[in-house]
């Protein structure tokens, strides 16, 4: 069993990136925290990690966000410093239709030699919300992306 706690908010143009045109940041810049707990039945332990949100894009009832893992239990230590992605589908209050998706169990990538391994996750990239939420209720408040600051 996995549990996810999302606390994220939009922070447009707050994270300048060192690429041409990235000096102002992105309209999808965001802040906040994602907390993940995963119960390993075969070991009877819960492994936890936490990620600092860096990007979020929404549409009505949906959100896609990414974050950099900043804290992790020993069994999740390979996640430290890596970006992870999430998608959330808000099925409406009390309807039991919420869903969540996450990158580490649904994505893979090939290198230049054709060898498979874990997927690299770019900002605001995640698979569709593939897992049914069995307890809890997510709320997604959609906001249009903000126009660039004046002068761009």
Image (tube, grey):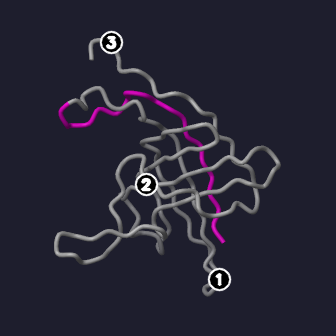
Q: Which of 58 and 48 is in front in this view?
A: 58
Q: In this view, does 46 lie to the left or right of 77?
A: right
* Mark closer to the chain start, 3 or 2: 2
Label 3 sits on a secondary structure element that is loop
Q: Mark 3 points at which residue?
A: 150
Please tell me whether mark 2 or mark 1 is closer to you in this view: 1
Distance Cα–Cα, label 3 vs label 2: 33 Å
Q: Mark 2 points at which residue?
A: 70
Q: What element carries label 2?
A: strand
| The magenta stretch spans residue 8 | yes
Q: In this view, does 36 lie above or below 30?
A: below
Q: Choose between 99 and 2: the one closer to the eye.
A: 99
Q: Earlier in the sequence, mark 2 or mark 1?
A: 1
Up-down: is 58 above or below 135? above
Q: Quarter-wise, where is residue 9 in the image?
A: top right
Based on the picture, tell me whether residue 123 belongs to the magenta stretch: no
Q: Residue at x 46, y 62 (%)?
A: 103
At x 32% / y 31%, what residue is drawn?
25
Q: Estimate the x, y position of residue 29 in percent, counting from the top left.
A: 41, 35
Q: Sequence-wise, which precedes: disc 1 or disc 3?
A: 1
Using the image as rendered, state which of residue 59 and residue 7 is in the foreground: 59
Task: Report the magenta residues as a range.
Answer: 1-20
- Element under label 1? loop
Select label 1 or label 3 by which is in front.
3
Q: Indicate which disc residue 41 carries.
A: 1
């Amino acid at each position: 069993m996995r549990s996810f706690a999302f606390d994220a908010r939009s922070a447009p143009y707050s994270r300048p990136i060192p690429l041409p045109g990235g000096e102002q940041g992105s309209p999808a810049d965001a802040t906040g925290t994602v907390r993940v707990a995963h119960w390993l039945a075969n070991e009877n332990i819960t492994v936890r990690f936490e990620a600092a949100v860096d990007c979020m894009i929404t549409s009505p009832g949906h959100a896609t966000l990414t974050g950099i893992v900043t804290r992790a239990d020993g069994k999740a230590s390979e996640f430290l410093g890596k970006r992870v992605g999430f998608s959330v589908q808000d099925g409406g209050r009390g309807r039991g239709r919420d869903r969540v998706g996450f990158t580490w169990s649904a994505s893979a990538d090939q290198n230049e030699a054709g060898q498979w391994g874990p997927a690299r996750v770019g900002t605001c990239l995640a698979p569709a919300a593939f897992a049914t939420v069995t307890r809890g209720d997510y709320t997604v408040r959609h906001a249009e992306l903000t126009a660039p600051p004046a002068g761009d």
